[in-house]
Amino acid sequence: MKFILVSHGSFAKGLVESSQMIAGQQENLVSFGLYPEDDINDLKNKIETEFLKSEMDNIVFFTDLFHGSPFNAVVSLMGKYDIYHITGMNLPLILEALMARMNEDITPAELCKSLLANANNTIIDVKECLKEAN
């Protein structure tokens, strides 16, 4: 399964680098960033090219911000292709996705469902957590 991360600036690239620092070198994990000088159509073309050169039924897109420009670039492709797309990506979510895809039987739909079911566990109020521990 291939993961394509798309974000504002270098956030997606940073997630790839950080996840590989923790989980080791990863294949089929790519990132694209939208910078102030970039045209949204160029970003859309880049991610579409990456999508088309892959097994199209075995890809999950991750974006940083609901209704942000990278999100909109991926959504614009969803009218043409059957795309799995999760927005609001963070490092724990990407690490969980990388671990889950080690199960070669998991489908993109199952992966997305699992990630969404556990998403609340990726953000923790540490002060409350410490209070509960005491």
Image: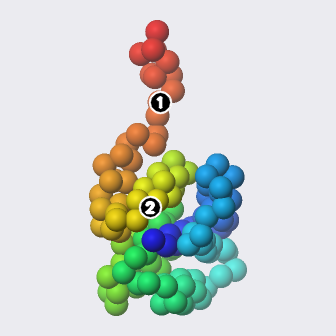
Which amino acid, by three-letter code, is at mark 2? Arg
User: Label 2: which residue?
Assistant: 101
Q: Residues within 10 Å of mark 2 (few under 14, many from 20)?
A: some
The reply, left or right, for residue 8 in relation to residue 129 is right
**Residue 70 or 120: which is nearer the viewer?**
120
Residue 9 placement (x, y as % from top left):
65, 67
**Residue 126 or 94: which is nearer the viewer?**
94
The reply, left or right, for residue 21 in relation to residue 127 is right
User: Label 1: which residue?
Assistant: 125
**Residue 47 or 68: which is nearer the viewer?**
47
Q: Is residue 54 visible to us here?
A: yes
Residue 83 placement (x, y as % from top left):
36, 78
* Secondary structure at numbered mark 2: loop
Query: Mark 1 and mark 2 in contact (Cβ < 8 Å)?
Result: no
The residue lying furthest to the front in this view is 104
Q: Is residue 44 visible to us here?
A: no
The residue mark sitting in front, 2 or 1, is 2
| Coloring applied to the structure | rainbow
In primary-sequence order, the first of circles 2 and 1 is 2
